[in-house]
Image (cartoon, rainbow, N blue to C red):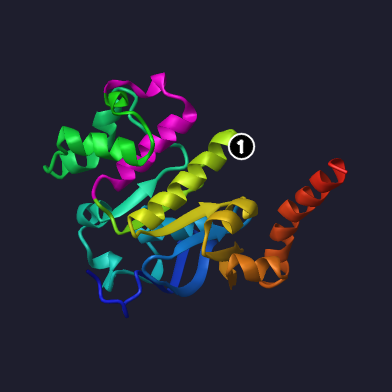
Amino acid sequence: MIASDIPALEFRDVRKSYGATQAVRGVSLAIDSGQFVALVGASGSGKSTLLKTINRLAPASSGEVVYEGEPVAGLPLPALRRRIGYVFQSIGLFPHMTVGENIGIGPRLAKQPLAPNRIDELLELVELDADMATRMPDALSGGQRQRVGVARALAGHPHLLLMDEPFGALDPITRNALGESVRKLHDELDLTTVMVTHDMAEALLLADRVLVMDKGRIVADETPQALLEGGGGTVAQDLVAVPRAQADRLAELSR
């Protein structure tokens, strides 16, 4: 177990450039173990790039990302990624593999294949029937496929779960149900979770802490309650204004 005084994750003046384009511009912050953090911002704000510096899908150009006290740049890449669960925006299941094979792909590549009862356990965690293990991905709904993606991310018993716009392609009812399921798993499994989303309502409802990015920088770092009370500055409040205005319009319609 990691000592409680060591943050689960730290960014130390992290920068990421693609040629002349600066996607991330000097981010420094710490995330404590057990937090559920939402990273919010408009398209192109740098939020997905910052997330990907953690597991080195987009290695930092300068600065340092530290996971459980160790700089990620110094860790062997396969070992690093086995310690971090990652849920893709596009789900990313292999279409030629069964659901069970997709869930177990990481441990199998690490020569530590999962036992069938572990596959069943992971399916149960994401509220799917065990008999889905033998199905192919194209036989599942979008929400079911994303639940399989979450199960795959949890297969290696990670302490840290990263999610990049995990619910963006789902219908509103499925999106809401899956968001609630992920928050429940976060609490039950004692995870640290960082979720990228462009949906401020989703961030406010699921996260303990909301980081707002704009032009590659963190411009707000607040609790949902503080944001709802007007904190975080102009960029953050512009994002909060969208679900607030929608709620006001719905209230007017119900009168």
Residue 46, visible in the rendered structure: no
Residue ID at (36%, 35%): 148
**Is 155 a magenta residue?**
yes
Residue drawn at x 88%, y 44% is 255
Residue 220 lies, in percent from the top left, at 61, 71
Towards the viewer: 62 or 153: 153
| Span colored in magenta | 134-156
Residue 111, image quadrant: top left
Residue 30: percent from the left, percent from the top?
Answer: 42, 74
Residue at screen point 44% across, 58% down: 194
Question: Residue, x 85% and y 41% (percent of image)?
Answer: 253
Which secondary structure class fits the magenta region best?
helix
Q: Taking 50 as reference, is 175 left or right?
A: right
Q: Identity of the amino acid at label 1? A: Pro
Q: Which residue is mark 1?
A: 172
Secondary structure beneath dot 1 equals helix
Which percent across, then down, holds residue 231?
Answer: 68, 73
Q: Is residue 106 magenta?
A: no
Residue 237 picture location, percent across and down:
72, 65
Name the image quarter holding the N terminus: bottom left
Q: Along the horizontal axis of the image, is 173 left or right of 162? A: right
Q: Is residue 46 above or below residue 231?
A: above
Q: Residue furthest front?
A: 255
- Seen in the picture, residue 125 relative to 128 is either above or below; the reply is below
